[in-house]
Image (spheres, rainbow, N blue to C red):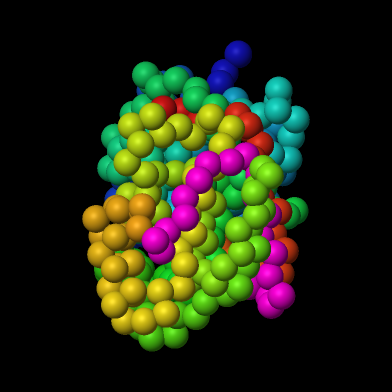
Amino acid sequence: MEKKLLFVYNPISGKSQVKNSLNEIINNFTKAGYVVTVHPTQHKLDGFEYIKNHIKEYDLISVCGGDGMLNESVNALMTVKKEKRPSMLFLPGGSTNDFASTLKIPINIKRASEKITDGKPFLCDLGRFNNQNFVYVAAFGALTSVSYDTPQDMKNKFGHLAYVVSGIKELASIKSYRVRVKYEDKTIEDDFIYGMVSNSNQIGGFKTSKNPEFSINDGEFEVVLIRNPKNALGYQIVLSDLITQNYISEYFITFKTSKVTFESDEMISWTLDGEFGGNVNKAVVNIIEKAFSIIL
């Protein structure tokens, strides 16, 4: 019986590099023995809808794009029972490609597509934020809106630099939030300028974990909270610590957990995998172990 592959890609993601590599990618899939169906997305959530509606017709799903495309495709996989979910081959076509870097997927999408012949399925954990899924990061506070506020044409033209420019513009408006953070039998309450729950060792191009035993399927998140520095010297220390990846100063709280709850008196904007995740004053974040399979 013929093996069938669905290839869904975002034609405007990153610097639109997939357009120049399309023939080689499809050829690699065909040489691996697959009958290929190609679908370029037409609008936001088109990837999710198309994969969800056709997932049962294919043996393998391959997607190419940025964080939004990754999030849509994994959410589509989650619409069928675990035993019926096909594996996914992800070709990183975004501007930062944090999750791909964590998994050591080649950033060159033509090389990434070659993994279809010698790659092996790998089970990944998935995050759950209230009633929404996220693949590798849920965050609030300083600079988190940069990923979804930065215009797509600016991302295409300048790549990661576009996020840096947009981030600099937002620095002057950084505010803190009074948040109660609960996990296991502990409660932390403080003023935070940033909070992150992640299943990746790179966020926004910055390394977030130096742990050589870091794993994306150990059933736990990495949580990072940054206290409000309150003065210019404090902000300078935080910035220096971020650049040097020194997260043990008085301004940082880090821990690992499978479930964490955030409560605040005011509504806080969250981002999920680089997309706007909503305004909430309570967020319950837990992990779904080994939820989906990706080819590595």
Q: Is residue 93 above or below residue 102?
A: below
Q: How many marks?
A: 0
Q: Is residue 292 above or below residue 277?
A: above
The range drawn in magenta is 250-269
Q: Residue at x 40, y 74 (%)?
A: 229
Closer-to-camera residue (268/83): 268
Q: Residue at x 44, y 85 (%)?
A: 173
Q: Is residue 183 magenta?
A: no
Q: Is residue 259 magenta?
A: yes
Q: Is residue 275 above or below residue 89?
A: below
Q: Residue at x 41, y 34 (%)?
A: 214
Where's residue 5, x and y in %? 54, 31
Closer-to-camera residue (182/220): 182
Where's residue 9, x and y in %? 48, 49
Task: Quadrant for the N terminus, please.
Answer: top right
Say whether residue 100 is left or right of residue 140: left
Where's residue 19, x and y in %? 35, 53
